[in-house]
Amino acid sequence: MKKKKILVLTSTFPRWANDTTPPFVDELSKRLTDRFEVTVLAPHYPGALPHEVRDDLTIYRFRYCWSRFEVLAGEKAILPALRANHLNYLLLPLFLLAGLFSAFRLVRKLRIDCIHAHWLLPQGLIAAIINVISSTPFLVTAHGGDVYGLQGWLPTLLKQFTLRRATRVTAVSGDLAARIHELVPGLDVSVIPMGVDATAFHPDLFAQDLRNRYKINGGFLLFVGRLSEKKGVRYLLEAMPMVVAQFPEVSLVIIGKGELDEELHGLTRQLSLAEHVTFTGAIPNHELPAYYATADLFIGPSITSIGGDAEGFGLTFVEAGLSGCLVIGTRTGGIGDIIEDGSTGFLVEQKSSEAISQAIIKGLNKVDQRKDLARRARKVLKKRFDWQVIANKYATLLDRV
């Protein structure tokens, strides 16, 4: 039987082997290839191949400017890239036009049956325009920043246009779906998150050499994510003196980089935490499982930022939970879809260093409870968020598009 042809539009996609870019679109797309013929279109980045075939995926990367100016995807996501330099807004029309032209050309050349657009803007908008021109049906998936972080009358109109043209709409969390219903009341929105490979993230990957490398003799605290405002890392750092007072040998490892890199390093020095906090920068995705499995607690102190951006879902919480690491998160965005307070982890109020410190101290003090929660979390998270479960849901939906 001939496979249905799907074009995946995304701005977040690994650029090369052992990349640090979040791989969730790649992981989902690979798992769809047994039922569909999948082609991926992503923005070009200096050093990345313009065209390649791997894991049964055909990947194209569109150029939208000279290499030195292709900065809207890759090291930063689009929103952080725009915030980092307002001149980058000048690249948006080029990005949109180049993406639209490349996508439409692939739709016609490959005789694409349907499009799966990740993020309402700009990928969903591109799919909506193609739908107007050629009636190509499309599924659009909202991830968070596209709904929470893009405000104002023009982005709102473009999002509403995209949602109304879409054949199917998914959101990665219930909170995000509710926000979409505020944009277009009565719209049919399916809540299907991204997934995690439960075989890749496992407690058995504990690595003593990581504790030795960072000279960790006490509790091992971990954060993984972009160093941006909505990740709330400053509140975790401000919680650390209270934790250190009770656990003098505790260590916090922060994995990631971003626009607040310098500011957070400065705050660490200001709080006299240099002996307790290590910034690793971004590390390749394949190295993360060992960090999660070795850490005692994972803390994701996310907040709703000044501009309204929030955590759409939070795959790092799932990765940590599957690895046997106790997770601590905040009550914002879609995190509540993952953590059930007191059952699979701890939920605290956002922007509260005191609440974060109390949860950490509780987790470090009650070792048996911590291990029980971690075991329960892995069982629940594997059942709900393993890639096989998630990919099957998306495949079923794409069959109907």
Image (cartoon, grey):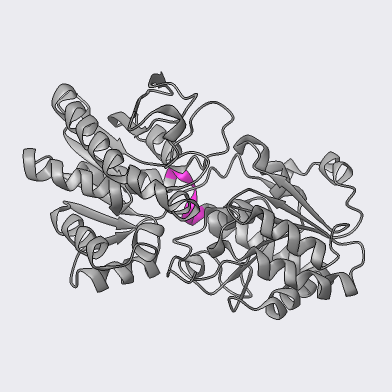
Determine whether, in the image, residue 380 is placed left or right of residue 203: left
Residue 126 spot, x, y in % from top left: 22, 44
**Residue 401 visible (yes or no):** no
Q: Nearer the viewer, residue 97 or 362?
A: 97
Determine whether, in the image, residue 345 is placed left or right of residue 392: right
Q: Residue at x 48, y 38 (%)?
A: 74
Magenta span of residues: 383-388
Q: Which part of the image, by quadrant, shows the N terminus? A: top left
**Residue 397 visible (yes or no):** yes
In this rendering, the answer to whether 199 lies above or below 153 is above
Q: Nearer the viewer, residue 101 or 243?
A: 101
In this rendering, the answer to whether 215 lies above or below 267 is above
Q: Which part of the image, by quadrant, shows the C terminus? A: top left
Determine whether, in the image, residue 263 is placed left or right of residue 91: right
In this rendering, the answer to whether 74 lies above or below 169 is above
Q: Residue at x 60, y 38 (%)?
A: 285
Determine whether, in the image, residue 332 is placed left or right of residue 327: left
Q: What main secondary structure does the magenta stretch of the protein show?
A: helix
Q: Residue at x 43, y 21 (%)?
A: 49
In this rendering, the answer to whether 224 lies above or below 205 is below
Residue 7 spot, x, y in % from top left: 26, 34
Would residue 304 be counted in the magenta stretch?
A: no
Q: Quadrant of residue 213?
A: top right
Marker count (numbered):
0
Q: Quadrant of residue 52?
A: top left
Q: Residue at x 38, y 36 (%)?
A: 29
Farthest residue, direction front: 87
Residue 265 spot, x, y in % from top left: 74, 56
